[in-house]
Amino acid sequence: MSPFKQTEAEQVVQYFKLKKKIEGGAKFVITQLGYDVRKIHEVLQFMRLNNLNVPLIGNIYVLPYGAARIMNNNQLAGCVVPNKLLKDLEREKAAEDKGKHARLLRAARMYGIMKGLGFDGVHIGGHNVSYGDLDFILTEGEKCAENWQQYVPLFDYPMEDGFYYYEKDTKTGLNTEVPRI
């Protein structure tokens, strides 16, 4: 399911479909990929507050600039890369390693945040992700999970004029339990 929808109507339909899938027997849920921590938290909040008790798996995609550009141009359905993230990736690709370390560290921090929030697991994907890369993501991700809240501000990648189902918690940068609708 995708918590990364721009309008209220799109998001509410996603949550309606999520409920129907679970009522229909879904044994777990995997999120679509995205990099907005409030949206990542939102799906977890929605499931908890609606007693949707199946495992939630977060999607972590090791995002290179080329794929990000395609997603930013809406050429890959359901994958959201806002302009702010694209600019960060463009800056990172100027590094000697073409941004690889930054990409892996972003994935590790996402892992840490998802674990800290209480996700039941993660799916890690991407092109040319080696065993060594995966080991780095998992090892560093476990370290990041210890103080995951400090990484929340690094994933402030909202969609322009995007809708959030819950009010923002200004202390944490995440969501409150108060729906906006």
Image (cartoon, grey):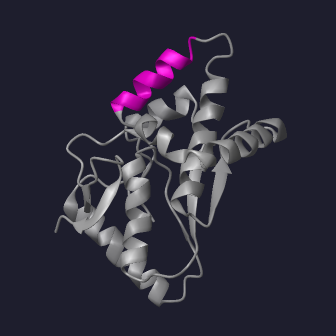
Check residue 5 for magenta coloring: no
Name the quadrant of the C terminus. bottom left
90 horizontally vs 95: left or right: left
Q: Position of residue 84 (x, y in %)?
A: 36, 29
Above or below 38: residue 23: below
Instruction: List x then y, in percent, for residue 176.
Output: 29, 61
Residues in magenta, as a range: 83-94
Residue at point 23%, 67% (across, down): 178
Quadrant in which residue 129 is drawn = top right
* Magenta span dominant secondary structure: helix
Residue 51, quarter of the rendered image = bottom left
Q: Decide: is 27 above or below 103.
A: below
Is 143 on the left or on the right of 148, as rendered?
Answer: right
Q: Considering only vertical position in the picture, is 163 above or below 83? A: below
Return the residue found at the far bottom.
24
Q: Is residue 91 above or below residue 85?
A: above
Q: What x and y, as percent, mark residue 96? A: 67, 10
Hey, which quadrant is residue 61 in on the image? Answer: top right
Residue 86 falls inside the magenta stretch: yes
Tell me: 132 left or right of 53.
right
Q: Give the image location of residue 26, x and y in percent.
A: 55, 82
Q: Residue at x 40, y 81 (%)?
A: 19
Along the viewing direction, whichever of 108 and 85 lies nearer the viewer: 108
In the displayed image of the protein, which residue is found farthest to the left?
181
Looking at the image, residue 82 sits to the left or right of residue 135; the answer is: left
